[in-house]
């Protein structure tokens, strides 16, 4: 397993990470534990979760699965989403963060979070309030590094400069949606992260499984898969345009002895600004397949060819 620095920080995260938004929803405690155990056996040290996944169960299952070997894993969780009734049970305020960090620590059965990420930008809380709160958490040892997710580039920029001016802890990473089918992060966010030495942690790296090639244009989604169970995502990913791009990507991969899923992951890792690809997995075999993808180092020629192929339209 390759390890990469998380942005400009000294933290070394596995190039393949583990996404856990299905834990506590589709996956019960035992199934989640199997996935975590497979991941750590294969050298994955970076596990991404949120206080909102499975309404807290994702954190709880991870806490149980890594009990007794907490030091071997890095846990990245998030805060923002609504966790109860009332206007102060959501967002990036001091009140909400301080309540939620304690709840996450309890569920994770730990006394520190490796990477604490703001899940969304909060237009109703001054950025100084959020950053001072996060800075306090780092000073108190409850959080080691801080990051953000779903922020526009200007929002990350505003946060970075606020930290610099007030001498507060600075975000070390961003987590945007980013994959072969959705490259909108490349317009502003990715160049910003390169210039400011921040780590990019792409979510939906496999476009919810679409980029593994298991969905076919002429057949219903295979039983038990995410898109079979989730009609809303189905409409979003299973489009004619996406299937056209998929066909070209599959051909590119096959010609080089790789699956399209491997290509999706290897393509993200070809960019050094990407710190970890947190592919979600519902079974141990999927974790193993995703780890294997990191062995493929795309050459500059292959990247250029892919660029052409992706630009061809549908
Ligand atoms: N910050 C945010 O707002 C945000 C939003 C979304 C996700 N995330 C994070 O990013 C992580 C990754 O995103 P994601 O899990 O939603 O999507 P993803 O990684 O693009 O896709 C994961 C899904 O693909 C399928 N899959 C994975 N490996 C496979 C393989 N080798 N062969 C066949 N199928 C495979 C599984 O689906 P099946 O269910 O069909 O088995 C799995 O649930 C999440 O788990 C979460 O930690 C963050």
Image: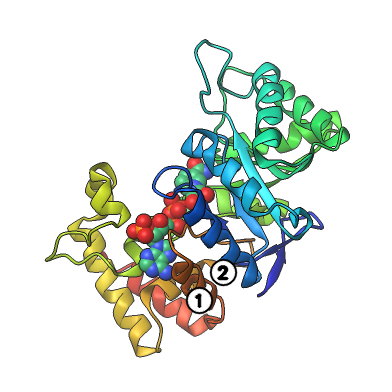
Q: In terms of secondary structure, where does tag 2 sit?
A: helix
Q: Which mark is residue 293?
A: 1
User: Of residues 313 and 265, which is closer to you in this image?
Assistant: 265
Q: Kindly tell me whether mark 1's CB lies below 8 Å from ligand 1.
A: no
For the C terminus, the image quarter is bottom left
Residue drawn 33% across the image and 67% down it? 311
Q: How many other residues sit within 10 Å of disc 1, few (<14), some (14-19) or many (≥20)?
A: many
Q: Residue 79, position in %: x, y?
A: 60, 32
Q: Is residue 253 above or below residue 236?
A: below
Q: Residue 115, position in %: x, y?
A: 70, 45
Q: Which mark is residue 269?
A: 2
Residue drawn 51% across the image and 73% down it? 288
Q: Quadrant of ligand 1?
A: bottom left
State how far apart marks 1 and 2 are (Cα).
Answer: 9 Å
User: Of residues 10 and 112, which is closer to you in this image?
Assistant: 112
Q: Kindly tell me whether mark 2's CB lies below 8 Å from ligand 1.
A: no
Q: Residue 109, position in %: x, y?
A: 71, 41
Q: Is residue 72 visible?
A: yes
For the N terminus, the image quarter is bottom right
Q: Earlier in the sequence, mark 1 or mark 2?
A: 2
């Amino acid at each position: 397993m390759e390890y990469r620095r998380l942005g400009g920080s000294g933290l070394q995260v596995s190039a393949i990470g583990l996404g856990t938004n299905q834990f506590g929803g589709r996956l019960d405690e035992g199934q989640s534990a199997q996935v975590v155990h497979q991941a750590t056996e294969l050298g994955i040290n970076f596990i991404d979760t949120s206080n909102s996944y499975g309404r807290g169960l994702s954190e709880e299952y991870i806490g149980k699965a890594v009990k007794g070997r907490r030091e071997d894993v890095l846990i990245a969780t998030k805060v923002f989403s609504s966790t109860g009734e009332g206007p102060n049970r959501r967002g990036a305020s001091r009140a909400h963060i301080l309540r939620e960090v304690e709840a996450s620590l309890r569920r994770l059965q730990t006394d520190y979070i490796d990477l604490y990420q703001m899940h969304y930008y909060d237009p109703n809380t001054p950025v100084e309030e959020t950053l001072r709160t996060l800075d306090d958490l780092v000073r108190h040892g409850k959080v080691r590094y801080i990051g953000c997710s779903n922020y526009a580039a200007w929002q990350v920029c505003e946060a970075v400069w606020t930290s610099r001016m007030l001498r507060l802890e600075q975000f070390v990473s961003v987590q945007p949606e980013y994959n072969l089918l959705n490259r909108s992060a490349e317009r502003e966010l990715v160049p910003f992260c390169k210039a400011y030495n921040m780590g990019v942690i792409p979510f939906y790296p496999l476009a919810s499984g679409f980029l593994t090639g298991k969905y076919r244009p002429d057949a219903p989604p295979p039983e038990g898969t995410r898109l079979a169970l989730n009609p809303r995502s189905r409409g979003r990913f299973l489009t004619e345009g996406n299937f056209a791009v998929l066909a070209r990507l599959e051909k590119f991969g096959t010609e080089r002895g790789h699956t399209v899923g491997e290509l999706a992951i290897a393509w993200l890792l070809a960019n050094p600004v990407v710190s970890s690809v947190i592919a979600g997995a519902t079974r141990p075999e999927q974790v193993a397949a995703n780890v294997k993808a990191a062995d493929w180092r795309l050459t500059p020629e292959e990247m250029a060819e892919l660029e052409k192929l992706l630009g061809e339209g549908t």
